[in-house]
Image (tube, rainbow, N blue to C red):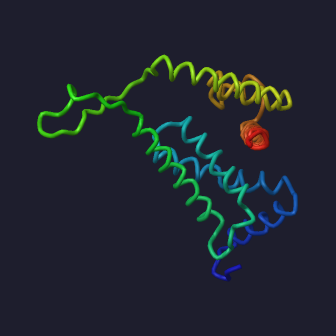
Amino acid sequence: MSSDLSNRAKQDYDRIQQALSGDQKAYAELLKRHWDSVYYMLLKMVHNKDDAEDLTIEAFGKAFKNLKSYEPEYAFSTWLFRIANNNAIDHIRRQRNKTISIDSQGRNSDDDNPVQLQSDFADPEEEMIRKQKSDLLLAVVDQLKPRYSELIKLRYFSQYSYEEIAAKLNLPMGTLKAQLFRAKELLYNIIKTKEV
């Protein structure tokens, strides 16, 4: 570990070592300690609270999954911010690429490039594929323990906000986020084992 690290960074390193040895509370402490700073950085980038919350959970998920590869040459927060920043950039690119191309009648008069129009509607084939994927995912979600299944369904199928879920289930926000993170991790593991 670098001697240039701040006391806070050294404390993070201790938590990481505890987490790697199986201490679940250490994960929760890292999450609690860095949640706000990561969330607000992402909110500035994506300008959407729900997307920022989802990206924050995703960033912590990737960081915790790859915790063994963390090198204490830099502070954990620096490493976590890099992960979160890269996730946000990927998200922004995906959002920009949601366009459809118009054939030759829709070309700009100045050049041969097709005009790009944003579409909020899927064609019938895409809609059918989306429905099939949704049904398959729902079947996988139903394999989770009931509390995790309910969290995933409320957040991603019913599209409840974190505040709405916390109120509905009478859960503190930190507990909700930690359980939703765990539910997504379990779901990922189920899907991963089903792939050939």
Q: What is the number of callouts on the image? A: 0
Across and down, in percent, residue 64 comes to 72, 55
Q: Is residue 177 above or below residue 63?
A: above
Residue visible at 50% across and 44% down in the picture: 91
Q: Is residue 80 above or below residue 184?
A: below
Tell me if 23 is positioned left or right of 157 in this view. Answer: right
Across and down, in percent, residue 187 comes to 76, 38
Q: Residue furthest left?
A: 110
User: What quarter of the picture does the N terminus occupy?
Assistant: bottom right
Across and down, in percent, residue 83 comes to 58, 57
Front residue of 88/93: it is 93
Q: Residue furthest top?
A: 124
Tell me if 81 is positioned left or right of 182 in this view. Answer: left
Front residue of 49/51: it is 51
Q: Residue furthest bottom?
A: 3
Residue visible at 58% across and 53% down in the picture: 37
Tell me if 106 is positioned left or right of 38 in this view. Answer: left
Across and down, in percent, residue 191 comes to 74, 39
Q: Quadrant of residue 92?
A: top left
Front residue of 50/125: it is 125
Q: Is residue 9 above or below residue 133?
A: below
User: What quarter of the picture does the C terminus occupy?
Assistant: top right
Q: Residue furthest front?
A: 196
